[in-house]
Amino acid sequence: MRLSVGRLTRAVVALLLPTALVHATAVRRASTCNGHSELCDRSFGNVTFVGAHDSYAVSSINPAANQDVNVTQQLEDGIRMLQMQTHNESGTIQLCHTSCLLLNGGTLQTYLQSVKSWMDSNPNEVVSLLIVNSYDNFSPAQYDTVFKAVGLDTLAYSPTSASLTYTNWPTLGDLIDNGKRLVVFLTTQADYTSVPYLIDEFSNVWETAYDLTTTTFDCNVNRTSGNSQEQMYLINHFLDDEYLGVLVPDKSDADKTNAASGTGSLGAQVTECAAQYSRNPNFMLVDFYEYGGGSVFEVAATANGVTYTPSNIATPVSSGASSTSTSSSSSNAGAIGFHVTTMHLSAVAAVAGGLLFGALNIV
Ligand SMILES: *[C@@H]1O[C@H](CO)[C@@H](O)[C@H](O)[C@H]1NC(C)=O
Ligand SMILES: *[C@@H]1O[C@H](CO)[C@@H](O)[C@H](O)[C@H]1NC(C)=O
Ligand SMILES: *[C@@H]1O[C@H](CO)[C@@H](O)[C@H](O)[C@H]1NC(C)=O
Ligand SMILES: *[C@@H]1O[C@H](CO)[C@@H](O)[C@H](O)[C@H]1NC(C)=O
């Protein structure tokens, strides 16, 4: 792989410095960062990551699900931002979708244990969490207790100040070498003075619009509390369907939505945003990421200027809303019956959800 100027400089410095000093300054250097040597010297703020929207909302029959496979599989396949919603269940931080009656993805602690195990087995990977805290507004101290219980607090990166411009983030190599490979964003209640690793999202990252039901993904700044020109940014690239006024994730179009090119595709939105701002999005949140057969990871690789190598990611799990089955011909009589059932179940549940939750959207 090619040597960057930064690496070359370090190599030259290492040759010139006395051995003792070299040992003091040049600690272990990761040679591969998030799968690519080119990314080790790249600022975190200049890398594009694929994120799983509502990463804990996993089910093939619940219409409130946004993903088909669990967080371990998501990480295994290349997801590097995990977005989640927290809800208060008798004082426990629970991962639910809109309401715990609708979709309960378990406790934050159990979920984070999976993240911790995976990160321990994959020491050259930088992972981000995006915690949507606006439902019940837990305090940083409450999160800190859970992170400590799991042992993720020591892996979490504390920035040098409460907000950083996109150019001021450390390189992936630095995060890995310093053992601070977990970057945690909190939408509300972040307090740099009490828990510095729980980073305030909107003073560090701006977002495009979300909850779209048409493919008109644009790149306008929709939510921020800082100077968007200096912040990293996140695109919400997932589509919803509307049933009787209730929004539910649109799985039937996921192939097209996640695609590398075409109308309404992830690739098209990235191209548009890159043209508008002269830089790529940092985070791309998607639903049912495995739809498209890896296209979301291809889009990220292209944005990062690295080679995309297709791998065997999870097979799309089809539910009722999708008419095409990707499964092989074995046991397909049962599969067809199942699809019809889940389609009806989805519709019934959407209606029930509408009645139960009124104007609340399941996204
Ligand atoms: C970001 O990375 C690209 C390579 O994809 C590089 O050309 C560019 O100079 C970098 N910009 C910054 C601000 O680091
Ligand atoms: C996650 O999914 C994988 C693949 O389907 C499975 O092997 C693993 O047991 C699951 N892990 C948990 C904790 O459910
Ligand atoms: C969560 O629920 C518990 C009791 O069910 C309550 O004491 C607490 O104030 C609630 N809110 C937070 C942020 O913990
Ligand atoms: C954010 O996007 C939504 C959906 O397109 C739109 O209704 C809202 O007005 C936007 N808000 C801002 C501040 O741009």
Image: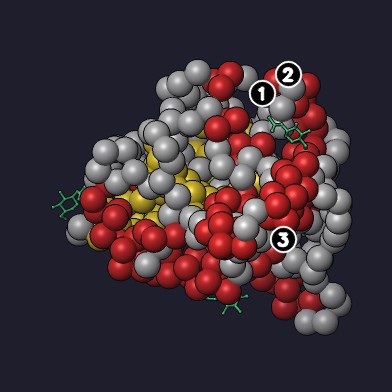
Badge 1 or badge 3: first in the primary sequence: 3
Q: Nearer the viewer, residue 194 or 352?
A: 194
- The reply to whether discs 2 and 1 touch (Cβ–Cβ < 8 Å) is yes
Q: Nearer the viewer, mark 1 or mark 3?
A: 3
Q: Which mark is residue 268?
A: none
Residue 316 visible to the viewer: yes
- Tag 1 and tag 3, C-beta contact below 8 Å: no
Give the quarter of the figure containing the N terminus: bottom right
Taking depth in this image into account, of 206 and 16 the one nearest to the observer is 16
Q: Please give the residue where the numbered disc 1 appears in the rendered image.
A: 219
Q: Is residue 197 above or below residue 270?
A: below
Looking at the picture, how far across and down is residue 156, in whole percent?
43, 54
**Distance (Cα) linking label 1 and label 3:** 34 Å
Q: For mark 2, does the 10 Å Cα neighbourhood hold few (<14), some (14 to 19), or many (20 or more) residues?
A: few
Task: Indicate which disc, 2 or 1, sits on the residue closer to the N terminus.
Answer: 1
Q: Which residue is mark 3?
A: 31
Q: Is residue 295 above or below residue 165?
A: below
Residue visible at 26% across and 60% down in the picture: 145
Viewer-closest of 263 and 227: 227
Tell me which amino acid carries mark 2. Gln
